[in-house]
Amino acid sequence: MKRPLLALMVLLLMLAGCSSQPQIEQDGSLDFQKNFHNGNTGSYSACESKTGYYFLVDNFLHYMEKKTGKTTIACSKLNCTHSTPDCDAYINSNDIAYYNGKLYYAEISGGSGTLYSADLDGTNRHKMISLGSTASGDTPYILHRGYVYYVNDTNLMKYQLGKSGSKEEHVHTFPNTSGADYKLWGDKNFVYIDTEAKDYQEVVYRYDIERGGCKLVWSVPSVNVVGNWESAGIGANGLYVSDGIIYYYLSGNGVWKYDIGSGKNTRLFRINDKEKRGIACFDAHYIYINNAAALTEEVPTSLFTLYVYNYQGKEVNKIPYGQFYSEHDLQSFDVLGTTDSGFFCQGVTSKTINYDFGDMQLTMPKLEVYYIQTKNSQTIRQIL
């Protein structure tokens, strides 16, 4: 009878010893938001909470309620014009993230980034940590399973959230060229880092949250393996990670997957139509291909189109947006984030906004946000 009791006591002591670790909710509420980090840059200006969506438009925080679709600006000041840094909704950042009931953003000053947290109404802002910057001037970071992961110079760092006295921890140093870009990604118990090798070819590293260790798990395949594509020998034209599988799009070639466990590349389906070349972003169900970003041959504005495919290779929607692009005087049009039934896009217009900082004047392009249903509709609805 003593042995079972002793085993129970040992188990309880082991569980007690783990109590200082960050809480990891199995429903995914403390996981990295894949559906709003599915573009091709490391900076994201939209995120999702349990009740709505947040957008950082022209440096002002907006909220869209899920149930009603109503949008509001995060400012409670009377007679505020929402056009100066004095506005409650103003955030000096290009990105916004939701995590565990808080908003997070990075402010850039003097070439270095600082991470801040805020309540969901944009108030009670709190300085967290210095993120530093990379040689390209970016401050890539993600929030995933109890930690902030970020790249400072060529170093992957982590910082535990919700722990008093937490300090930055070094994880890995990348042997990269000067000026390399970094894109971070979280998937279950791993953090992925999409960057460049010394020969400028795209590579992906994976950090194991539980066991530690960061290692190279994928390099852009050679033409001998997958055939030719627009940026052959340099990188993929869109990439997504889920359950140990790297999905990637090769413009003018098709959609592929790479199994990290087996080391095998498999083509999911071929897309070599000339009008469907460009860049792609992914979510759990669909692949979005934007032909405005074709590399080898410029596409006329009138033919700009966004194609939506499922993972079986079926085209589920085709949204021509050339006329819309011209009417709104746009310079770019990109997928911002996805929902269960549709997706948001962001347009950068040729219009400008002037900011008055007292001793400094700043002019920036005006942004717009749109919503499109994934299926059965080609309507582009402006929401901001």
Image: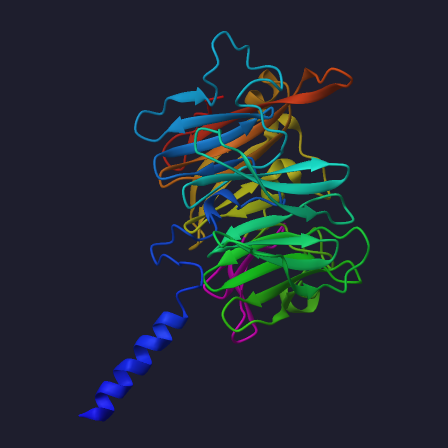
| Figure check: 241 above or below 214 | above
- The residue nearer to you, when weighing 294 against 4, is 4
- The residue nearer to you, when weighing 259 against 117, is 117
Residue 341: x %, y % from top left = 36, 38
111 horizontally vs 9: left or right: right
| Figure check: 311 above or below 20 | above
Task: Write down the region rendered in magenta.
Answer: 241-270
Quarter of the rendering containing residue 12: bottom left
Is residue 90 something that shows in the picture? yes
Q: Quadrant of the N terminus?
A: bottom left
| Figure check: 248 above or below 137 | below
170 part of magenta stretch: no
Residue 82: x %, y % from top left = 55, 15
255 part of magenta stretch: yes
Residue 108: x %, y % from top left = 69, 37
Main SS, magenta region, reads: strand
